[in-house]
Image (tube, rainbow, N blue to C red):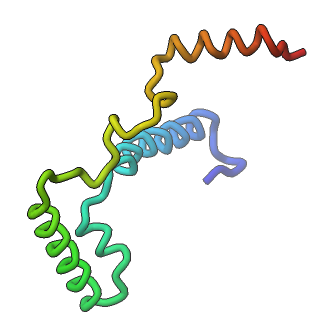
Amino acid sequence: MFDQKSTGSERQQFLQLILQQDETGEEEENEVPDDETVNMWIDRNDGEFELFQKMDTDRKSEDAKKVPRKPRLMDETELPDWLLREEDDVRVWTCSLLIFFPWD
């Protein structure tokens, strides 16, 4: 990586290259994997992969039969009120706390 012979500009170029690669990889890390990808991650052999795929297919067909169909993830209506507050409300609440409990 770095040795006594490398110059400051070489070090800077190398570090910038690392940061650029990290920025492009960050988008991929934040993506939610699909069922097939998760199945590939957790399978220990081909038989398990096929079993997991079949389980997902069965689950999807059972979900399709349900009326009304609920999403697998939590909806905003299911969140507690304190999580849905606007940022300005939170700031006012925080300021009022500081008035009652001043920190030294």
- Residue at 49% x, 44% y is 18
| Left or right, residue 74 beside residue 46 | right
- Residue at 50% x, 16% y is 87
| Left or right, residue 52 beside residue 81 | left
| Left or right, residue 43 beside residue 96 | left
Q: Looking at the image, which residue sits at the far front?
A: 67
Q: Measured along the vertical axis of the image, is residue 103 above or below residue 60?
A: above
- Where is residue 96? Give x, y as percent: 69, 10
- Where is residue 91? Give x, y as percent: 59, 13
| Left or right, residue 74 beside residue 89 | left
- Where is residue 62? Give x, y as percent: 14, 69
The answer to which image quadrant residue 92 occupies is top right
Q: Measured along the vertical axis of the image, is residue 83 above or below residue 11?
A: above
The answer to which image quadrant residue 58 occupies is bottom left
- Residue at 22% x, 78% y is 55
The answer to which image quadrant residue 36 occupies is bottom left
- Image quarter where the N terminus lies is bottom right
- Residue at 23% x, 51% y is 71
- Where is residue 17? Give x, y as percent: 46, 41
- Image quarter where the C terminus lies is top right
